[in-house]
Image (cartoon, rainbow, N blue to C red):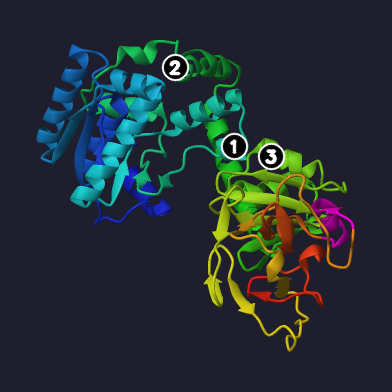
Amino acid sequence: MNPRSLIKFIQSKGIFSGEDHILLAVSGGIDSTVMAHLFNQAKYRFAIAHCNFCLRGKESDEDEDFVKRLAKQLKVPFFTEKFDTSSIASQQGTSIQMAARDLRYSWFEKIRRDHGFAYVATAHHQDDQAETFLINLIRGTGIAGLHGIPVKNGAVIRPLMFAFRKDIEEYATHHQINYRTDHTNNETKYLRNKIRHELIPLLCNINPEFTRGLTASISRISAFEQVGNQVMKTWCRDAITTDGKDQFIDIQHLLKSEPVEPYAWALLSPYGFNETQVANILGCLDKETSKTIFSATHRLMKDRQRLILSLLEPKTQDKSFKIGLFAKKKRMSKPVRLDFERISDVINYKIPVSSNIASFDAGKLQFPLTLRKWQHGDAFFPFGMKKKKKVSDFFIDQKFSLKEKEQAWFLCSGNDIMWIIGHRIDHRYRVTSATREVVCVVTSDG
């Protein structure tokens, strides 16, 4: 291991250019200290940032002093910040490790933006790769948890991912590089340390090349994942059709793909649906029943032979809108466009034949009228019928889709539904020979 191997790795992976200014995250431990020395030897432009998490009392302050002296020795800019990590973790109800990680990366990103650094470099190496793989495997994970630590992830880079811990230790010894040792790294109460000090040595006793072999396997998994993602991306693009705001997925197209689960996951997970929800949808694809599930941002409805994916909008289900008495004409634009007109010349009035226009006997209307959505138990007298019918049965008879049911608006007089807008008026409110005044309502959204 030497500066040339660092340069070769960075160039081969296209991690950054020689002109970029890099912010190094340096704790004072052997990995990050060696990284700083390598960057200096390679003559890269860099600065050093150090987080003092105040978790080890005097030792934490000594770490900070050490890194400050290192930056002075290498003649590079130095940034440092103290965090009351324990208190912040308690306030957030999270572990100290998670709190420290979030604080570290948030602060690094702020420095990067404020001072114009191209990237933040951390000192992860191949042994970290193996440990992370085993942690994810033990906890249970999908393919994404087995592809290892990426060399480049947004503005964060890992330029030491070509090296093993043994290489770094040999470099530090050969060049007599001083570094700080955190005694908590030897405590096996943490899962990573337990894997590092107990599990991996056991596996290496079985196969001395275990770590090297595992990292090679991780690289292959990552490569296959990239190929799989590209295939899935193309398949998902072909599987979805769009009509306005909604997206449609043909169920038969999905069922023809084997095995179905990974295709469904690739299709739905980008919209925030979790594994349980995807499994629930898959369980009803070959059934007649309808089903609706929600993610934080989207709604997925199983409707006959297709899935309908919609972006969630502000809820209007429980809202109602009042339309007061008017003299001649009235218009409302939201939530649905309606134009009202009172017509006194009933003799010459011809009832328009259009689903978007409704004519009512004004004398039977009770103002203010109400505009609302479908409610449980709703019923009305469909035009042409003299007996009551449940709205739910009307929807079935008219073969309403789930989407159409949700989009339906009801114009009501008192407690009576006088019009399922764009579909059917109530027979009781129709215009007859006894009508003395007509209220005509036109919708452009029916």
From what the image shows, is residue 91 above or below residue 295?
above
Magenta range is 387-399
Q: Quadrant of residue 233?
A: bottom right
Q: Mark 3 points at which residue?
A: 277
Q: Mark 2 points at which residue?
A: 193
* Residue 398 on the magenta segment: yes
* Residue 42 on the magenta segment: no
Q: Which of marks 1 and 3 is nearer the N terminus?
A: 1
Q: How crowded is mark 1: few (under 14 residues within 10 Å), some or many (20 or more)?
A: some
Comparing labels 1 and 3, the label whose residue is closer to the camera = 3
Which residue lies at the image location 72% right of the left edge and 83% below the top edge? 346
From what the image shows, is residue 286 above or below residue 446?
above
Which residue lies at the image location 66% right of the left edge and 68% below the top edge? 243
Q: Where is residue 189 in the image (x, y as percent from the top left)?
A: 45, 10
Quadrant of the rendering where the C terminus is positioned:
bottom right
From what the image shows, is residue 349 above or below residue 305?
below
Q: What's under tag 1, amino acid-wise?
A: Ser
